[in-house]
Amino acid sequence: MKAGMDATQITTVLKTYGLSALLCGGLALTGCGTVRNTNTARSGTEQMLLSSAFDEALRRIDFSPLENAPVYFETKNIEAVDKGWVISSIREAMLVRGVRLMEKPEQASVIVEARIGALGTDDFSFLIGIPQITVPATITGMPMGTIPEIALMKKADQKALSKVALFAYDKASGGVVWTSGTSAGFANSRNLFIGGLGPIQSGTHKRNPEFMGVVLPQMTVQPVPIPILPWSEEDPDASKKAALKSDKTESKTPASISKPMIDKNLNSPEMGGQEPGTVVPIPIPLPTAGGSPFSMRLFNGFAPKDKGLLQSNATDGPKPASATDKTQK
């Protein structure tokens, strides 16, 4: 701006510069791009689920009994959607187990046949809201058309199932030498819509859940540490001391009544406790086969010391007379 300009000229210049700046910024921000996408007749998710389900069923079969045997693999009874994947996967599984595959039946002494009982997908959906409704023209006063779906929550899942079985027989005698039994495998894909937002995708074919194609961080639950108060080791001379004590005392009252566990400090050394501070993470290991189900305490004031209860009759007083003893007397 030049010196000596009046207010009207200054305002005109500022408007011109401002409009020019807006036009330049708009041209810098605008853009145009196109992407050409094509889809196959079968979706990639369907193919992934089918192959995953079959691989799971095949992993359950043990080919080790046919190790080092010259085997011819007969494929005439295999009818499946992905036949090439099925045949190649079975051949690989046998080779990994040490089976010697022959190209011709004349070269083998064992024939292996396979059959596919199932290899397909199922799907189901669940909706909380208003489903899509088509209004027919027969209703007077209401225009014909389609009311779109209004979903508060929607779940659409797809599941793949597979079933495979194999057996082997001796080519010379025709007797069965091995059978795998029936093996089944499963795979699934989950799609969740909440309030019109989604899909939130998860399943066996995805490592982490995805929200509209964006991978979500995997959430893990950290173990919660809780205090464990193990029982103190048994004194080797405790049995001798208990025997001497029982000779001196003549009380006929059971120890569970004469020495009740109520109002006892379970953290005291005589109750088998110890000072707090011992912390282990969940899961808690189960007691050993030779131990007692109360061999550990999870919380303070829980589970009285069972060793004293189990040995009370032998340590603190004579054993109460049973009904058989009273009859003999």
Image (cartoon, rainbow, N blue to C red):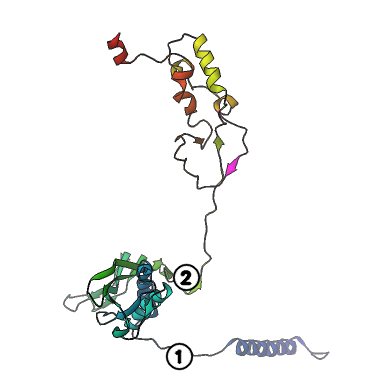
- Specify the principal SS of the magenta part: loop
Closer to the camera, 238 or 79?
238
Q: Relative to residue 211, is residue 74 depicted above or below?
A: below
Give coordinates of residue 191: x percent, y percent: 39, 69
Report the residue that reaches farthest toward the left.
138
Would residue 116 be visible to someone looking at this image? no
Q: Are marks 1 and 2 in contact (CB under 8 Å)?
A: no
Q: Quadrant of the N terminus?
A: bottom right
- Badge 2 local density, few (<14 within 10 Å), some, or many (20+)? some
Residue marked by disc 1: 36
Q: Relative to residue 8, is residue 188 depicted above or below?
A: above
Question: Who's the residue at 68% across and 90% down the image?
Answer: 16
**Magenta stretch?**
272-281
> Residue flagged by tag 1: what amino acid is it?
Arg
Q: Quadrant of the C terminus?
A: top left
Q: Is residue 9 magenta?
A: no
Q: Relative to residue 157, is residue 4 depicted above or below?
A: below
Give coordinates of residue 285: x percent, y percent: 49, 45
Give coordinates of residue 248: x percent, y percent: 52, 9
Residue marked by disc 2: 211
**In which quarter of the view is residue 187 placed?**
bottom left
Closer to the camera, 265 or 89?
89
Q: Relative to residue 157, is residue 34 depicted above or below?
A: below
Question: Who's the residue at 58% across and 29% down the image?
Answer: 267
Report the residue that reaches farthest toward the front.
172
